[in-house]
Amino acid sequence: MKELIQALKKIPRVDLGAFPTPLQPLKNMERDLAFKNIYIKRDDLTGVGPGGNKARTLEFLLGEAIAGKSDVLIVSGPVQSNLCSIAAAACAKLNLTCIIVHNGKEEEKAVGNQILNRLLNAEMHFVDCEGMPARDQYVQGLVAKLEENGHTPYIVKNGSATGVGSLGYVSAIVELVKQCKQESISLGTLFAPGGYGGVSAGLILGNALAGNPFHIAVMSVEDTHSELHANIMNIINEAKTLLGLSLPKNFEDGWHICDDYRGEGWAYNTVESEKMVHSFVQKEGIFIENIYTSKVLVGMEDYIKNGKVTGNVCYLHTGGFGSLFSQF
Ligand SMILES: *Cc1c(COP(=O)(O)O)cnc(C)c1O
């Protein structure tokens, strides 16, 4: 753990959010499932823009950008990308220009994160294309133009699921270990989403380097087990090189992936996930959304009901509040 904290200190980072995020009991869920000690880690309340996991990620990405004297951030994603809105808010705070490249058409009437982007007055480009290569090519064109005009752009790649970005969740493990100690809470399994795998890679690596204080249960919301596993391992390999640390021997013991709850994949609701968006806020007063956060909760509830977890459990709420308003 000490070694991990030292290694993290050497990496450029900016102060963006409100940390530690709260760790709270889910009392009504405990009662309904007759299961003791269910917690929620409120990374929906990270304190920048609409909140969410990308604030942790951006502390390291923007740290790298500023260390490299960049003055413009280029971030890309679908029209309802949570990353793009949080990045625009973070750039406002740090006096950087933010350019958003969306793969998708501009909506006639803005909803969800599009409203936030307009309020932020972020420069938005819409590339109506199929797949990432065309979008990335567009970004390359933008970079060339900006450089011609004397700017130093920094590109956020792969939806922030990179080695550098994942350090936000390596560091979240350090935060959670400390918080558990201070608040006398012991946690067994931490349930987290797997999209591209940036969040989960960081959690898994941080947990392993901290000596496996938790078990990380990654609920895929997008890809199959083997696809997500490959993505996670690539990101972990990048991140451990950045930290200058190697994977401990018992690395494999601290985590697993489950792809049972993803349905047809990213942004396809399942019957259960759609129900959960309603039932969870009605039970606990905490909003979740369809694409990421709901499927993780469906998985966690199913694990609890079927006796697949022992010990205390914790749900990592990764946010997505902005996109919720485009989903209904
Ligand atoms: C981006 C995002 C995630 C997933 O992160 P990955 O690093 O791509 O796995 C999870 N939840 C929310 C709300 C997000 O916006």
Image (cartoon, rainbow, N blue to C red):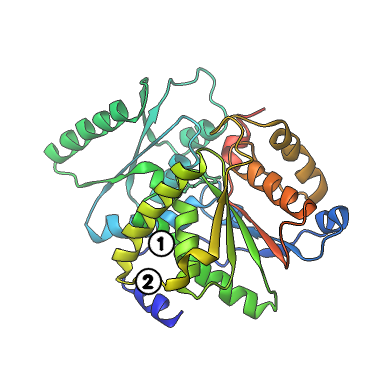
Residue at 31% over, 29% down = 135
Residue at 44% over, 42% down = 227
Amino acid under label 2? Leu
Q: Which image quadrant is residue 14 in?
A: bottom left
Residue, disc 1: 167
Q: Is residue 313 above or below residue 51?
A: below
Which of the numbered marks, if any, corresponds to residue 230? none
**How much space separates mark 2 and mark 1, taking CA atoms?**
8 Å
Q: Which image quadrant is residue 277 in?
A: top right
Side of 257 relative to 310 (left or right) = left
Farthest residue, direction bottom: 2
Q: How many marks?
A: 2
Image spot of residue 187 (x, y percent): 67, 69
- Work out whether mark 2 precedes mark 1 in sequence or the reverse, and give the earlier one: 2
Image spot of residue 51 (x, y percent): 55, 50
Image spot of residue 137 (x, y percent): 24, 30
Q: Is residue 288 above or below residue 249?
A: above
Q: Is residue 296 visible?
A: yes
Could you tell me if the residues under marks 2 and 1 are in contact, i.e. CB atoms within 8 Å? yes
Q: Is residue 41 above or below residue 289?
A: below
Residue, disc 2: 8
Crowd tier of the residue under label 1, counting other residues whose Cα lies within 10 Å: few below 14, some 14–19, many 20 or above: many
Side of 182 relative to 123 (left or right) = right
Image spot of residue 299 (x, y percent): 68, 47
